[in-house]
Image (cartoon, coloured by chain):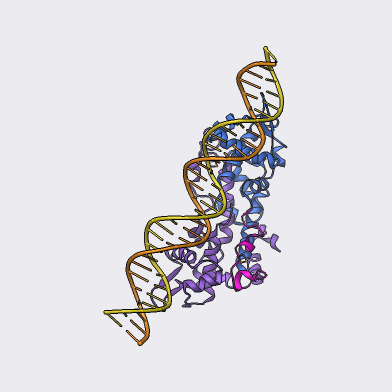
Chain colours: A blue, B purple, C yellow, D orange
DNA sequence: GCCAATCTATACTTATTAGTCAAGATTACT
DNA sequence: AGTAATCTTGACTAATAAGTATAGATTGGC
């Protein structure tokens, strides 16, 4: 259960484009330098973001990347899904089936129930965050996090 | 952000031992067969659990593995930490440092703030679950999940 | 003492993810 | 048309995680 490099750099590249503003254009060399990754790797990641429909590319001179839609309509949960998949996918239990009672009889598995709970908790945060929310400084972001409703764990950040 | 094989199988082996009850003893071949993994792999995972202090081993004939402490004192969050590390470790941002404003000036990064929020959400679930909670069937476990306090995302499981 | 059942440790192989490279395609400008 | 700046694609290499193999150490029973 670790953040992948794709998720980390992909999200950062997207934030970088968000800072460039609506219609703002950044080239691969620019993004690459800003995020401290190689141009080739930035290109690879940006391709994933493009195929996910979050950014669009223009080729040729004066080309570059730009957000495909307004920052407030880009939900971070969807971005993370594209960059790194889900924490707990439904097929997971099929491919890791044990033999006897606990997990094969997959109609009845407490472990799976726990994984689902974790997935829901993650989704609860990531489905509420948009790229717009990330286009602010850390302090403002912390306020945003605390504003997630309910006396849930996020309050612990307080 | 995916569950690792270590986490999946490690937790299942632990649950299996939990079913064996306090003082219950299972050998590597038994666990291996029950969980559908090779004996060698089960051994590798059980070693991690032993070093984490969750199970203890007895060698020689009549040997095997047993829980190191009562199931209700084994917190799943700690188990997952040992098996697969944290989602977002503090050194993470050091090793993935970008160059300019967003992530190098790590005193001010909204992305990091989001990762922390996700980590807190995960911990909120996993720090409340003990091995005892997992020693019940899926339906009972779902009830347990719903009982996590607050109108938070876990309600979505309803 | 010997043997069989068991865990232990380390090294090895395979699969997946991370990251690089090189050739090609598109566009703007002259 | 020519050229330079740009994205696109697929193949390649490197690093890490997953899984296997093998030799060794411990224990109980005969
Ligand atoms: S069915 Fe997947 S962990 Fe039990
Ligand atoms: S400092 Fe780590 S994501 Fe920004």
**Predominant SS along the magenta part:** loop
Q: Is residue B152 magenta?
A: no
Is B74 positioned to the left or the right of B142 in the image? left
* Residue B112 location (% of width, % of height): 56, 44
Q: Bounds of the magenta span? A: A86-108
Is B157 positioned to the left or the right of B84 in the image? right
* Residue D30 location (% of width, % of height): 35, 87
A92, above or below A14, in the image: below
D8, above or below B57, in the image: above
Q: Would residue B130 be seen by someone viewing this image from the given angle?
A: no
Q: Which residue corresponds to the image point at 52% horizontal and 77% vertical from the top-left?
A: B20
Q: Which residue corresponds to the image point at 51% horizontal and 66% vertical from the top-left?
A: B38
Q: Would residue A122 be seen by someone viewing this image from the given angle?
A: yes
Is D21 positioned to the left or the right of C16 in the image? left
If the picture is divided into quarters, which one holds ligand 2?
top right
How many discs mark residues in the rendered view? 0
* Residue A65 location (% of width, % of height): 66, 32
Q: Quadrant of residue D10?
A: top right
Pick the residue in front: B46 or A1.
Answer: B46
Pick the residue in front: A68 or D29.
Answer: D29
B46, above or below A81, in the image: below
């Amino acid at each position: 259960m670790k953040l992948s490099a794709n998720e980390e750099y992909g999200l950062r590249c997207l934030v970088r484009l968000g800072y460039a503003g609506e219609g703002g254009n950044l080239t691969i060399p620019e993004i690459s330098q800003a995020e401290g990754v190689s141009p080739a790797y930035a290109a690879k990641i940006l391709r994933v973001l493009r195929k996910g429909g979050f950014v669009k590319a223009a080729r040729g001179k004066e080309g570059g990347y730009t957000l495909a839609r307004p920052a407030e309509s880009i939900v971070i949960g969807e971005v993370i899904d594209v960059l790194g998949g889900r924490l707990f996918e439904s097929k997971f239990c099929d491919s890791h089936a044990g033999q006897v009672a606990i997990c094969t009889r997959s109609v009845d598995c407490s472990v799976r129930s726990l994984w689902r709970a974790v997935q829901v908790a993650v989704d609860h945060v990531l489905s509420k965050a948009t790229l717009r929310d990330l286009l602010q400084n850390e302090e403002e972001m912390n306020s945003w996090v605390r504003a997630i409703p309910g006396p849930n764990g996020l309050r612990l950040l307080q």
